[in-house]
Amino acid sequence: MKRQLITTFAVAVCCSLFSWAAALPVIPAPALVTEGEGYFEFDGSTKFAVENVEQLDVARLFTSRFGESAGFVPAIEIGGDGDVVFATDATLPAEGYKLDVSTGGISIKAADTAGFFYALQTLRQLLPAAIDGSEYAPGTRWQVPVMQVEDSPRFGYRSLMVDVARYFMPKNELLKLIDIAAMLKINKLHLHLVDDTGWRIEIKRYPKLMQVGAWRMHRDEVFPARPNQRPGEVPNEGGFYTQGDIREIVAYAADRQIEVIPEIEMPAHTSSSLAAYPELACPVVDKPITVLPGGGGKNTQIIYCAGNDSVFAFLQNVLDEVMALFPSKYMHLGGDEAVKTYWGICPRCKARMEAEHIDNLEDMQGYFMKRMSDYVRSKGKIPMGWDELTNHELPEGMVIYGWRGFGEAATKAAAQGHKFIMTPARVLYFIRYQGPQWFEPYTYFGNITLKDVYEYEPIRQNWKPEYADLLMGVQASMWTEFCRSEADVHHQLFPRLLAAAEVAWCSRGEKDWQGFLHRADAVLPHLQAMGIEYARSMYNIDHKLTPVGDGKVQVEMSCIRPDVEIRYTTDGTDPVAKSKLYKEPFKVKKATVVKAVTFRGGEQMGQVLTLDVAFNKATGREVTSNVANDYVLTNGLRGSDRHSDFEWAGWYAKDGSFVLDLGKRTSIKRIVLGCINNSSMGVHIPAEIKLSVSSDNKTFKPLATKAYSHEEVFRTRTAIEDAVFDGLSASARYVKVEFTNPGKCPKGDFKEGQDTWVYFDEVIVE
Ligand code: ACM
Ligand code: ZN
């Protein structure tokens, strides 16, 4: 009988595996699931039988959840009988588990404590979401479906990085994140404890790290636009974790099977420690060193002096305290984005280079990192660092985090036999926009949608097979430059962390985006029960308006969720469930306000997108240039004051031009060019704009010129600044716009010495 049952189970696993794996509302999706009939119900008489104290602790974390919401707490006993029975099975993979739920009981098998913990996280997600709340929920049936699950992770390294240096996250907020990460079977928390913006860990030997390094000036501006501390200002924003806090965080995480990995940045990104101990910077630094409220400009070039032995002594002493606090076998040493301007002119650094026969500044960083990583190894820990460490000889045993672009630099480390982790900025940096930018809080760079994260496959086709063996796993990196509150962090993290957890846990295979969304929809209420407001960006509408060339504009809309309808109006009213259904791109040929929003089952799901399509003589006409998205110039739609919103066409570090074809000879009285200034991002209006006209697109006749003063070009602000050419009198088919790049950002500018961008969003011809 028993044998018969097992055979049936095996067949069932094979046959129904895919649909069930997709259907069981659990994230990350368990590897193998077979369905059954009915439910097991937890109640006040439910008893857990475990084998040892470790299992008891794991079980207690689970049973205690019932306390507030269910009004009972299941009993747990070591040995004996129970309804939920733990049994060690050493044949199962690390962190894996087998779960057998019947109406009469639950059997959990695992080889290690983590496996038991993860089995319970699966059950936790299958219980009503109220299990994660603190409100009494009478009448709730605390049921989980009858099923069999066999599950284990793809990667042993499944991580969340939290930047507590930009946004100092209070301890309780961090504990909440740990609990959610654990529910998603994430097993590493990388704490970015140090940056230019703050030092966040108590180091008893160096009290000024806490007195000075942990505090900066509050600024209302967004991160890149925040001025540095001015003379006389007293820093008023910040904080740090005491060593007691760190012990509590580490223990809380360990209880949830999460290893906390500390990162102490060096030799750059550390104005915080240098503000506290300026003698550790190169002696040639000739300005006050302060903790930076924001981007910092050239002050970020102030880094530890590599020629000063006191720097290494300081860092060793700091690491001694840090490594004693964190039981992790890893110690992250940073190593990213070190601008070595001062090293190049510092007599101490020069003397070091001579003594050590180092002939370039990259190798000088190699020397620095090797010295510190040798120290870490001498203490029995494994050093880790960002992928810039592949720019020089890699210190022995160093684990590399691939972050720039798609993180490919890490494969340079793999080629030398180093282990590595993927946290590519293009996919797993949750600082980036997660949806149509007009609806999102202001942040940096491009978009990484929930779908982008879900579809990420860390192992690239062009890799040598041995690289895959060295890949430890993946990490979602929550950089917090733009966060000012817990809610800001939650908005950026959720739901994208669910997708990252899935990438880290689930084996490589067919992706099922819709299946993932269904499961995410079931898991997100658990987050809500914990008071998390997750982003609903996945319900917002992306648009693409393209000039068709005949004076018409094509309107295309899309949503990353396939299970919603887009409904829209063209009469200025907000769409309702019965408004026109968007089925395919359509054309408009006169001024039109398109309003669109997603619906599901008659319920509005996203925010209303307003496309204010304005028509002038250039709208819908063709533009020729050397940038890919020049179609935005005549699509009738203005950009926002975010030059990254995909409504702006940009030229970097060089002069540029484009030609507008009005389709036929046209009278021209006025031309407006939409320009933008975002000084904190090195975006400026052109130094000069020249207009000329032609009837054959060959011979052009000058029409008008506009030159801007240095002060006008480099104004410190973010604003749309149109270039208006009034009083024109011409008749032509072609208009050429030539513009001069303003050159490098001037002294004192946010981006001093850096090349500039010039952007246009629209050409308006009247
Ligand atoms: C990094 O994002 N600078 C590691
Ligand atoms: Zn120096």
Image: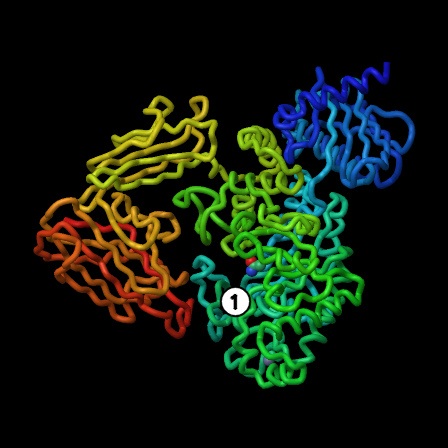
Vertically, is 110 above or below 646?
A: above
- The x and y percentages for residue 359 are 60, 79
Vertically, is 561 above or below 395?
A: above
Residue bearing the label numbered 1: 292
Ligand 1 neighbours mark 1 (CB distance < 8 Å): no
Q: Does 725 sit left or right of 46 as displayed?
A: left
Q: Residues within 10 Å of mark 1 (few under 14, many from 20)?
A: many
Quarter of the view holding residue 517:
top right
Of residues 276 and 766, the one drawn nearer to the viewer in this rendering: 766
Rendered-image quarter of ligand 2 = bottom right
Please name the residue shown 74% across and 71% down the image.
317
Residue that sits furthest to the top in the current view: 1
The amino acid type, in three-letter code, at marker 1 is Leu
Please name the residue shown 34% across and 35% down the image.
556
- The x and y percentages for residue 548 are 25, 39
Of residues 5 and 440, the one drawn nearer to the viewer in this rendering: 5
Colour scheme shown: rainbow
Q: Disc count in the image?
A: 1
- The x and y percentages for residue 701 are 12, 61
- The reply to whether residue 456 is in sight is yes
Please name the residue shown 70% across and 74% down the image.
314
